[in-house]
Image (cartoon, rainbow, N blue to C red):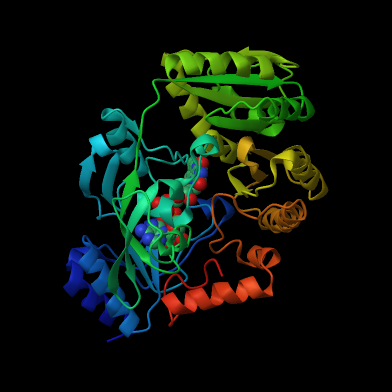
Amino acid sequence: MSNVTEVSADLAKIVGAEHVLPGSTAHYLHDATEARGLLGFADCVVLPETVEQVAEVMRCCYERSIPIVPRGGGTGFAGGCVPQGGVVLSLERLTKVRAFDPFSWKMHVEAGVPTGRVHRLARENGLIFPPDPGAAEQSQIGGNIATNAGGPHAFKYGVTGAWVTGLEVVLPPGNIVEFGGPFRKDVAGYDLKSLMIGSEGTLGIVTAAWLKLLPAPECALPVIACYADAASGCGALERVLGSGLVPAALEYLDAGTIAASGGAFPWPLPEQAGFMVIAEADGTRAEAEALCEELREALGEDALELYSPSARETEPFWRWRHGVSIAVEAALGGKLSEDIVVPFEHVGRAIAATVELGDRYDLPALSWGHAGDGNLHATFLLAPDDTAALERADAAARELFALAVELGGSVSGEHGIGLVKRDALSSLADGTVRSLYAEIKDIFDPAGLLNPGKKL
Ligand SMILES: Cc1cc2nc3c(=O)[nH]c(=O)nc-3n(C[C@H](O)[C@H](O)[C@H](O)COP(=O)(O)OP(=O)(O)OC[C@H]3O[C@@H](n4cnc5c(N)ncnc54)[C@H](O)[C@@H]3O)c2cc1C
């Protein structure tokens, strides 16, 4: 019997034969980097239903020295869940809401619960779970934690990690442990919960999380402004922060992004629109209305057009905003999209540099993103089968990473390092830091079997 047949038979004893799929099952071999042609390969796919099964699966793989690749919703942009051999462990059947206490604003959910379900459950009870990454119906809470996902409202509310108080994790070779719990403060030991958050499935498998929630703001009022060019738009962004205003979200779209996604924008756009700023005021009705007025004033100077959606129009508007990434990809059928982060004062320079790189490498280039956080989705468009364009886009991305570091920023503000950005991490961390990364990995996963080849 081959090793693959043997391990599949052992895994079937743990989870049931119907929950072990052939390694060739296409759904489990890619994530959102498919748009740049990344496809993996696996020995088999296993779908456990409980934390105990996750632990047994890990033990079985560890004993046989078989790599394990944790998979959430497969919406990652870094190839983090794309297998390079071994067993794909999908968390999709861990979908229980173990506890929900609206009166003390907390929820205990299993890793496979889709982000959108957490949003809805909180909302139906007058609460919010603020992290709002764009693919919320497909991504899972476990994947959001493993990538420390952000989103537009991270500007005011912070990224996923800020909303996690406890984790249940399976550590190699198959031990179930808890970090933190249903309490909001904990300084007793080392902060291992935070080490897990953003570790991209390389240190442990998250099986459940205690999430902190917040009473929903009474009112959220977006303000959208269009400008002729990036210079006037970036001036407006600086006026918002410079005036001490704190919107819930502060976003931008450059000219190329408006061209690719503006067709579905809910209102007519000015013909000369070359830059868009999106801000949102929230709070009690009185607070939101007062902040909205101040935002209109700060954004209105130099604007071609200002929009203030009504309460009824707000949700369709954000749905459009969350679809920008997909609209951009549809322009040529593929894209290489990065997520560099720079200090706020350098956002304008990074936006201009993305377009300049596109000109130099003969690729349509554009960007949009979370301006208040200095986080750019700098993107090069390509046809899916154009390997020469992909090589040029890779080279352009390398220059972009170097620029982000030179400006005092980082190569990834949201999507993580995964498979596709491993080389970029070395440009960021010096030798001492790199050794610490390697030693931490070694402590948690001494045989190097958990999501090998990712992040480090
Ligand atoms: C249209 C679109 C819009 C997006 N918008 C945003 C955005 O605004 N902000 C943002 O941050 N991201 C965004 N993303 C990227 C993506 O949705 C996030 O990175 C998300 O957190 C990935 O979650 P997932 O469940 O799909 O994880 P996957 O893609 O399945 O996996 C991502 C990584 O996490 C690991 N992993 C998954 N589950 C677990 C687990 N339970 N335990 C341990 N490791 C695990 C995997 O091994 C992999 O390394 C967007 C993606 C798309 C397609």
Q: Is residue 74 visible in the rendered structure shown here?
A: no
Residue occupying the point 33% across, 78% down: 173
Compared across the picture, whether 117 is left or right of 162 comes to left
Q: Nearer the viewer, residue 184 or 273?
A: 184
The N terminus - image quarter: bottom left
Q: In which quarter of the image is residue 19?
A: bottom left
The C terminus - image quarter: bottom right
Percent across and percent down for residue 87 are 36, 71
Q: Nearer the viewer, residue 93 or 157?
A: 157
Percent across and percent down for residue 391 are 70, 59
Residue sticking out furthest to the front = 188
Q: Nearer the viewer, residue 148 or 28?
A: 148
How many marks on residues? 0
Q: Is residue 414 visible in the rendered structure shown here?
A: yes
Residue occupying the point 70% across, 65% down: 427
Residue occupying the point 40% across, 25% down: 217
Q: Nearer the viewer, residue 166 or 189?
A: 189
Is residue 57 placed above or below 116 in the rendered structure?
below
Percent across and percent down for residue 199 are 47, 62
Percent across and percent down for residue 100 are 22, 42
Is residue 242 placed above or below 55 in the rendered structure?
above
Q: Quadrant of residue 204?
A: bottom left
